Amino acid sequence: MEQKKMALIATKGTLDWAYPPLILSSTAAALGWEVQVFCTFYGLSILRKDLGGLKVSPLANPAMPMPVPMPVLVQALPGMEAMATMMMKAKMKSKGVASLEELRSLCLEAEVKFIACQMTVDLFEFKPSDFIDGIDYGGATTFLDFAGSADVTLYI
């Protein structure tokens, strides 16, 4: 039987949007699938050396459960993003959810192939030293060659 393949496109750069591509890719790799994650635009944030800057915003995120209902005006106040991020991280830790760093390490150990979109790297003037070791750089055609034969392709 041929090895299953999963192709993901990661486009978001917040704490809550960094989890789905890392959880899905680490799980698929653990199941023996070949996995590639194409990180473009803000999705490049999951490949940066320092993940500490990733935050979650309560503003314009109506599905985010808050401990108490908050009007939009309160959510827009300075410091609310930091508070929401702290609360989310504490909640994840209390529930035993792996950190982004742990998930990313699992992915790398399981040979998930991360591709940094070269166009986006150039656009935002990033340097290779901004990113973790062990990733590839390429354009859409690099990713599409793989995605065209993937069993599962997801846009996140």
Image: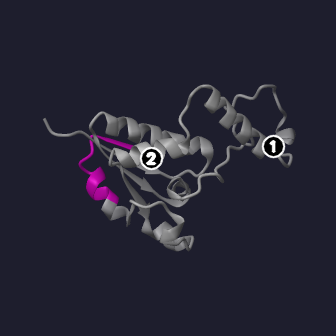
Closer-to-camera residue (46/93): 93
Residue 146 falls within the magenta-colored stretch: yes
Does 76 sit above or below residue 97?
below
Closer-to-camera residue (53/3): 53
Residue at x 33%, y 35% (from the top left corner):
30
Residue hosting label 2: 105
Closer-to-camera residue (27/139): 27
Q: Position of residue 4 (x, y in %)?
A: 24, 39
Residue at x 31%, y 62% (from the top left corner):
142
How many residues crowd mark 2 within 10 Å: few (<14), some (14–19), many (20+)? Answer: some
Residue 19 falls within the magenta-colored stretch: no
How many residues crowd mark 1 within 10 Å: few (<14), some (14–19), many (20+)? Answer: some
Q: Position of residue 73 (x, y in %)?
A: 86, 41
Q: Give the structural element (helix, strand or loop) at label 1.
A: helix
Corner quadrant of residue 91 = top right
Residue hosting label 1: 80
Query: Is residue 141 visible in the rendered structure shown here?
Result: yes
Q: Going by the image, does 153 lie left or right of 120?
A: left
Tag in front: 1 or 2 = 2
Number of numbered discs visible in the structure rendering = 2
Residue at x 81%, y 43% (from the top left corner):
80
- Say whether disc 1 or disc 2 marks the residue closer to the N-terminus: 1
Q: Going by the image, does 71 lie left or right of 64?
A: right
The three-letter code of the residue at mark 1 reads Met
Q: Which residues are magenta?
A: 143-156
